[in-house]
Amino acid sequence: MSFTVPPLPYPYDALEPHIDEQTMHLHHDKHHQAYVDKANAALADTDLAGANVEEVIVSLSALPDEKQGAVRNNAGGHLNHTLFWESMSPDGGGEPRGEIGSRIESVFGSFESFKECFEAAGVARFGSGWAWLVLDGGELTVTSTANQDSPLELGQTPLLGNDVWEHAYYLRYQNRRPDYLQAWWNVVDWDVVGRRLAAAA
């Protein structure tokens, strides 16, 4: 079955003022759609055609060499963006509760320290990429990846990711990536992140 762009779980303007409606239209309808179209084209007539996107990402080496780059970039873009839309909510923000909150406080010392670490990963990512909270060998850690690379390629489970490609923020924040990273906490859906942690445990 071919990949499809999932509908947003909220209206395009629901994350205002932190993420603007025009950016959401362009990001979801144009950028994500392009990743899906190119991933489907690259996977056509391969053994992974019809596989779910997670399986595709962890099985890149099974593809012909000439297919691997296009699939990494575009299937990775589809996976990363699907996680991204699901990680946000107009009712998001605040501090994480339950197991995810306890684990963050235990590992990073405080929620504020975690946010600083995560924002630093996003600011330090040269060019395009993502900042991540991942589960790595059973431990929480903050990391970043280039372009549309997925933590799954490194054996890590992505729990929360923020897109620091310019298309994710430039209409509202221009070159102020740190401002975007800080504003984004207002829309993070910690219930979703908590469920991902529980599923990975």
Image (spheres, rainbow, N blue to C red):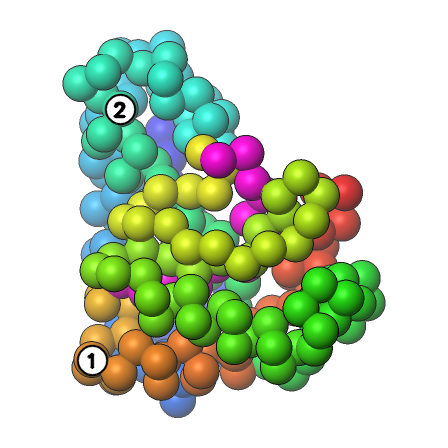
With respect to residue 62, does 103 lie above or below?
A: below
Q: Is residue 1 magenta?
A: no
Q: Which residue is mark 2?
A: 68
Q: Amino acid at mark 2?
A: Gln
Residue 187 in view, yes or no: no
Q: Residues within 10 Å of mark 1 (few under 14, many from 20)?
A: few
Q: Residue at x 36, y 85 (%)?
A: 179
> Does residue 136 appear left or right of residue 46 in this picture?
right
Residue 70 in the image, given as x and y percentages of width and height: 22, 31
Q: Residue at x 48, y 55 (%)?
A: 143
With respect to residue 198, does 126 lie above or below?
A: below
Which of 168/135 is in front?
A: 135
Q: Quadrant of residue 87?
A: bottom right
| Count of number-bearing discs | 2
Residue 83 in the image, given as x and y percentages of width and height: 49, 53
Which of 79/145 is in front?
A: 145
Range of the magenta residues? 154-165
Q: Which residue is mark 1?
A: 175
